[in-house]
Image (tube, rainbow, N blue to C red):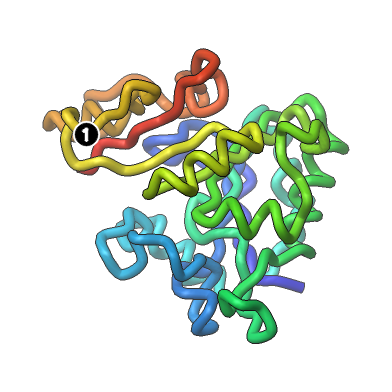
Amino acid sequence: MYPLHVVPSSENSKVGPCATTYRPVGDSAKGEGTCPSCCPHLNAGCYTYKGKTRLWATRSANTFNSMSKVVSKAMRFIRFLTAGDWMKHDPDSDTGYSVDLEHANDAVMVCRANPWATAWSYCHDIKQWVKDTGLFPAAGNMPKNFHLLASCEDQAMKDFAIAHGFKTARVITSESERAEDEIFCPYDRALHHGKTNREIKVRCVTCQLCWKAPEGKNIAFLKH
């Protein structure tokens, strides 16, 4: 059993109509949530501290939904971990945390059992993911409909992720910071330039750049 709040049919203003999941936000090494200690956004402006996302993330600490609930409304898209990450507290690990394998395995099994659905998510310590699960695109052992992006804030982590076949994502504060191999998330770029949620027409489920970006291209989210 692990903390998980599932919204089987969400209308999140950014992701669009899909199933979404939420886990507690906080440093897993300290037993405060499911995020790796290396995430630079912990207590530093993470978007999950705002609005309904914060509500669902907080509620998830005492909610233990079954992973199968994500397909209960037969939504074509699944956004795993709109809040939170893949980790759990692990005092025996060098980092103080490890991948919550029960949770990760359930997510993978749901994808394998429902090939008609497209799932995507992010991990802020992709090295820990590979070490603990052994799953990565270059090995050909991840479900084709499960797109896990590596959230990378330094070049070493990005190099590791790309070598293992992952697309990467990171948050930047200005357009000038974009690397040559990165393309902008159009939704966040519009917000960055002053557009409102109502004015922006694109949604994750219609954009799909996170997993359909051209070969060799990764995602940059402009902070807003």
The total number of labels drawn is 1
Work out whether residue 84 or residue 203 is closer to the camera in this orientation and state it: 84
Relative to 82, residue 88 above or below: below
- Residue under numbered circle 1: 177
Q: Quadrant of the N terminus?
A: bottom right
Q: Whole-percent x and y of residue 135?
A: 76, 45
Q: Whole-percent x and y of residue 58?
A: 46, 71
Work out whether residue 60 or residue 95 is closer to the camera in this orientation and state it: 95
Q: Whole-percent x and y of residue 199?
A: 22, 24
In the picture, measured across the screen, residue 86 lies left or right of residue 110, that is: left
Q: Residue at left 21%, top 34%? A: 177
Relative to 126, residue 84 above or below: below
In the picture, measured across the screen, residue 95 lies left or right of residue 189, that is: right
Q: From this viewpoint, which residue is outermost toward the top?
A: 214
Q: Element type at marker 1?
A: helix
Please state which amino acid type lies under the numbered disc 1. Glu
In the picture, measured across the screen, residue 116 lies left or right of residue 26, that is: right
Residue 62 makes an appearance in the image? no
Q: Residue at left 24%, top 28%? A: 189
Residue 2 makes an appearance in the image? yes
Q: Quadrant of the C terminus?
A: top left
